Every structure is written in structure tokens, then in C-alpha cells.
Image (cartoon, rainbow, N blue to C red):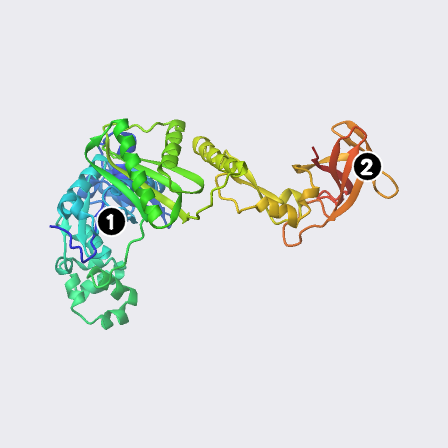
């Protein structure tokens, strides 16, 4: 069966034994006893999940642990780990990206894929489904039930309640034969439907919807419409597909580093051509490598300004690979290599000049990009001005690779008194002893057990607290720029009140060069 390009096609897969598959994969062994995973619900230990052997012996999710032990004393109970299950299914979602960029989680134990326009790459939906089952089986999933349908709700119902695996549907014929449980309504509602003689989806669909809206809710009729394919509720991908993307599928797994580098260069060039066509530049680029054994590696690089030059991007990728503690090991080879521009910004053409200062700015930006790529964006930092009167709050430390507004420091220096402040300001003012004259002007300063006689003092400059923010703990400050007899220059202030209740205490806040 091949996909119909005029309609959307969704593939939903259900992994009924996800928790046990994850546990056995982590522990690297098969349990010879039935496994159940237990969680507390309203103070009672209940089965959150069971493995295939426990289900075949009559145990089901939602059953009390005491009842399960009464039926099957040899059962092994393990504490459920929803976070580990979620991490495992996200890794499986990464594997599904090899088949379509639109992959969404289908809680609690399934995935939903938008395969519209993708089936022809695998010679049809049946081949795509077979390859996907094989990939998930290699990743440790024992049972995978999947279905392909025009809407995600129809595909979910067929995957979880149809006896055909895999199931392909072009209309509602197959879904109408499913039991009413496929509507996934509340247990009491399902019981009410069965008592009324409505056992299948067709029995419900053939009745006027107003009857069910009055008896149940409008959500029930909306769910019925989606299951029947009357409404297409699009999925929300786990990772939004990038608008600028190129990928290379390999007929045979590729393990040669030279071949991989050549493919990555071609993909980067293709993405940059797309950026040029749309007059944008990329800020964040990501290469995804899907290995034949199911492992997925992502290498991301970031630039401080938009770029669309493949040579620059590839150089950053090489720097990133060289800095990795865990190198990019192809193992048995890569099946798919994908390159994406994850974040783009408008491209602004600049007029070239002969100014050495402009060339220096470009070189600094390239240096920042390379250092941030090699050592991490959180290890190469810069200062950014903040609109605050309090000196220690007037700047923030941010990653240097983040874009800076043009001339931000120059504007900050003009619009404030920052030019009268020292370039070195301590984040926490240092307490000092000050001898002042009758006019409260400093005559001597003792700092770090050294006495400095003051030859000149300029001030005071009064800075009050910002009432709209949390108090700094120093109250109103009177700042002085002082110079010692040895020529050392300090920036000190007298605090009107400190957090400890002390008054008229002096602090040294900065040092002039």
C-alpha cells in the first residue's frame, strides 16, 4: 500500500510492554518470573504495568497488588519508574526521526508519526512500517503494534484495539468494527454503552450524536468524530521540524570518517543555499547522526551572529567534535545524517570597509564562536549592561555567544554616570575603616590591614535604593572617588543603614586603574 499524497497519513504505534522492555534493557537480563510494576494510587499499591508473561496469566494494569499476589504468588513486583519510562520512549522517538521529522509522544506508551509524503522514500507504507518495527526491536522493544490512518485518533484506536498488526486504513471501515473501548471514554460510560447494546464503534456512530451529547458530554462526540476520521487534529511534534533542513539516507551504513565528513559538507552547503534563498542567516546548527544499532548523536553549534557560510559552520563542527569527551563513533555505520538550521535571523548585508577595527570585531566574533564551541557556551562569558542604579546590579554575566545590541556599552556610558565609575567593581562591597572630617569627608582608609592617607576626595554621589526591587541591604549610599597619597584610587561609599541594622558604615566597592 502506498500513501496518498492528497491526504495526510499518520502512523501510531503502541508498545504495551514498554516498562518491562525498559527494565530488561537496563538490567541486561531476562526475568524468569512474571514482572509487574507497582505504583501507589489512593494509598493502595496497584499494578501500573505488566510484562507479557504476567498478562498472559491474567494480570492487568490497575489491579491491586494484593489481588495479583493472590492469583499469582510467584510474581515479582518492581517499583514503577515513570521518569525512566519517559526517557526511554523519548529515545525511541529519536529513532523514529529517521522516518519522518514529525514525531510526537502518544502517552503513556506510544508514539504518533506524521508520515505524509514520507512513504515513497521506503517504497510504501508497508515497508516503512516494517523498517520501523525492526528498528524498535533492535532498540529493545519486544512488541510493537502499529496502524496507519488519515487521522491520529483513528490510527491510535486501530493500533491499540485492532487485531491486525500492522493495520492500514484509508477510511472508517476498519475502525467501525472496533469495540466501544476504542473511544477511550470513562469506564462507567463504556459500561453504560454496553448495557444499552452498543458494543462497537459502528453502533455508536449510527445513532444521532445529539443523544450522546445529552447523555455524556460534547467531548465524547468530538472524540467519536476524530476516531471516525471526520476531524484531523494535528500532532504536536516532540521536536519542531526545522524549516531549513537537509538529510542524506544511506543505502548501506557508512562508517568511513572521510565519507561522513563529505556528506556533512554537502548537507551544510544545501542548508546554506536555503538560507541564502530566504535572505536569512543561521545562529544555531545541528547535525543528527542515526547509527545502524539505533544510537542517535546530535552535534549542535552556535554562532554569535547570523551566518550562512558552510566553511565557518563546518569548522565549528570540527572544533566541537575535537572537544567531545565521547567522540563520534560510527560503530557499524550511520544510516541517516541530517543537518538543520535550528534558529535563523534576518540577514543584513554590510558594506565592506578598509577599517582595521571592523576586521578586529569580526575576528573577535569568530574567536568567541570557536571558544564557545570547544569549551561550552557557559564557560565563555561577557558583561551586558542592565538598567539599574545600583552599581553591582548594573551589569549581568551572560554567554558571550549570545547576540549583543549594537553599541550597547557606548550608549550605556553616555546615558548614565558609568564613565565616572571604576572598571573593576566587586560583586560584594568590602567593609573598610574610614576616618572622616567634620563634613563626613574621608581622610584615611584602612583596607586589608593597610592604611591609606587620602590626598583628594570627590563626592558625594548619592544613590538611593530602588523601591520596585528587593533591597540591596545597604540603604542610601554616598559614594566618593578618593585618591591616596601613594596615587591609588578607590571608589568607596558610606551606607546609611545595612542589613544588620548598623549605621554609617563604610565600604570599598571598586578600584580605579
In the rendered image, is residue 296 in sight? Answer: no
Residue 402's spot in the image, x, y percent?
48, 42
Q: Which residue is mark 1?
A: 113
In front: 460, or 325?
Answer: 460
Which quadrant of the figure has residue 506?
top right
Q: Which mark is residue 30?
A: none
Vertical order, 111 against 321 (above or below): below
Q: Does dot 1 land on a helix, a strand or a loop?
A: strand
Horizontally, residue 123 falls left or right of residue 511, namely left
Q: Nearer the viewer, residue 163 or 193?
A: 163
Which quadrant of the rendered structure holds the C terminus? top right
Q: Position of residue 476 (x, y in %)?
A: 73, 48
Residue 456 numbered tag = 2
Q: Is residue 215 left or right of residue 319?
A: left
Does any portion of residue 279 appear in the rendered image? Answer: yes
Q: Between marks 2 and 1, how big is the CA–CA gap?
A: 74 Å
Amino acid at each position: 500500500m502506498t500513501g496518498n499524497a492528497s491526504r495526510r497519513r499518520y502512523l501510531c504505534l503502541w508498545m504495551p510492554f514498554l516498562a518491562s522492555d525498559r527494565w530488561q534493557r537496563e538490567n541486561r537480563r531476562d526475568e524468569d518470573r512474571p514482572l509487574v510494576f507497582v505504583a501507589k494510587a489512593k494509598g493502595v499499591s496497584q499494578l501500573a504495568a505488566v510484562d507479557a508473561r504476567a498478562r498472559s496469566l491474567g494480570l492487568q494494569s490497575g489491579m491491586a497488588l494484593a489481588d495479583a499476589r493472590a492469583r499469582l504468588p510467584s510474581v515479582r513486583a518492581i517499583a514503577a519508574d515513570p521518569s525512566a519510562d519517559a526517557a526511554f520512549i523519548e529515545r525511541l522517538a529519536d529513532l523514529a526521526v529517521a522516518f519522518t521529522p514529525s514525531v510526537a509522544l502518544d502517552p503513556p506508551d506510544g508514539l504518533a508519526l506524521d508520515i505524509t509524503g514520507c512513504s515513497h522514500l521506503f517504497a510504501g507504507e508497508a515497508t516503512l512500517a516494517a523498517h520501523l518495527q525492526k528498528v524498535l526491536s533492535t532498540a529493545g522493544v519486544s512488541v510493537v503494534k502499529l496502524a496507519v490512518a488519515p487521522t491520529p485518533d483513528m490510527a491510535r484506536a486501530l493500533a491499540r484495539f485492532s487485531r491486525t498488526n500492522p493495520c492500514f486504513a484509508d477510511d472508517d471501515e476498519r475502525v467501525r468494527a472496533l469495540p466501544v473501548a476504542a473511544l477511550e471514554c470513562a469506564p462507567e460510560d463504556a459500561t453504560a454503552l454496553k448495557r444499552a447494546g452498543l458494543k462497537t464503534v459502528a453502533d455508536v456512530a449510527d445513532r444521532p450524536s445529539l443523544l450522546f451529547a445529552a447523555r455524556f458530554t460534547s467531548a465524547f462526540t468530538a472524540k467519536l468524530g476524530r476516531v471516525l476520521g471526520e476531524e484531523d487534529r494535528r500532532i504536536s511534534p516532540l521536536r519542531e521540524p526545522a524549516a531549513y533542513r537537509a538529510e542524506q539516507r544511506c543505502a548501506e551504513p557508512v562508517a568511513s570518517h572521510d565519507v561522513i565528513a563529505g556528506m556533512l559538507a554537502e548537507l551544510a552547503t544545501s542548508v546554506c543555499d536555503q538560507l541564502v534563498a530566504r535572505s536569512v542567516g543561521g545562529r544555531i546548527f545541528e547535525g543528527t547522526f542515526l547509527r545502524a544499532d539505533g544510537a542517535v548523536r546530535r552535534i549542535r553549534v552556535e554562532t554569535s551572529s547570523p551566518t550562512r557560510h558552510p566553511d565557518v559552520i563546518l569548522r565549528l563542527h570540527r572544533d566541537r567534535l575535537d572537544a567531545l569527551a565521547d567522540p563520534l563513533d560510527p560503530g557499524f555505520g550511520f544510516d541517516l545524517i541530517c543537518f538543520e538550521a535550528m534558529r535563523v535571523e534576518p540577514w543584513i548585508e554590510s558594506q565592506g570597509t578598509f577599517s582595521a577595527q571592523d576586521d578586529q570585531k569580526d575576528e573577535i566574533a569568530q574567536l568567541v564562536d570557536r571558544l564557545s564551541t570547544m569549551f561550552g557556551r557557559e564557560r565563555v562569558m561577557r558583561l551586558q549592561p542592565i538598567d539599574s542604579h545600583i552599581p553591582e546590579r548594573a551589569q549581568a554575566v551572560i554567554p558571550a555567544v549570545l547576540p549583543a545590541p549594537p553599541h550597547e556599552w557606548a550608549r550605556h556610558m553616555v546615558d548614565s554616570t558609568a564613565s565616572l565609575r571604576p572598571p573593576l567593581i566587586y560583586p560584594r562591597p568590602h567593609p573598610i575603616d574610614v576616618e572622616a572630617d567634620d563634613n563626613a569627608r574621608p581622610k584615611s582608609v584602612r583596607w586589608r590591614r593597610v592604611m591609606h592617607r587620602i590626598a583628594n576626595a570627590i563626592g558625594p554621589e548619592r544613590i538611593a535604593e530602588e523601591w520596585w526591587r528587593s533591597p540591596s541591604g545597604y540603604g542610601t549610599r554616598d559614594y566618593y572617588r578618593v585618591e591616596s597619597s601613594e596615587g591609588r584610587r578607590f571608589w568607596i561609599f558610606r551606607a546609611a543603614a545595612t542589613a544588620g541594622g548598623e549605621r554609617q558604615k563604610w565600604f570599598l566597592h571598586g578600584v580605579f586603574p
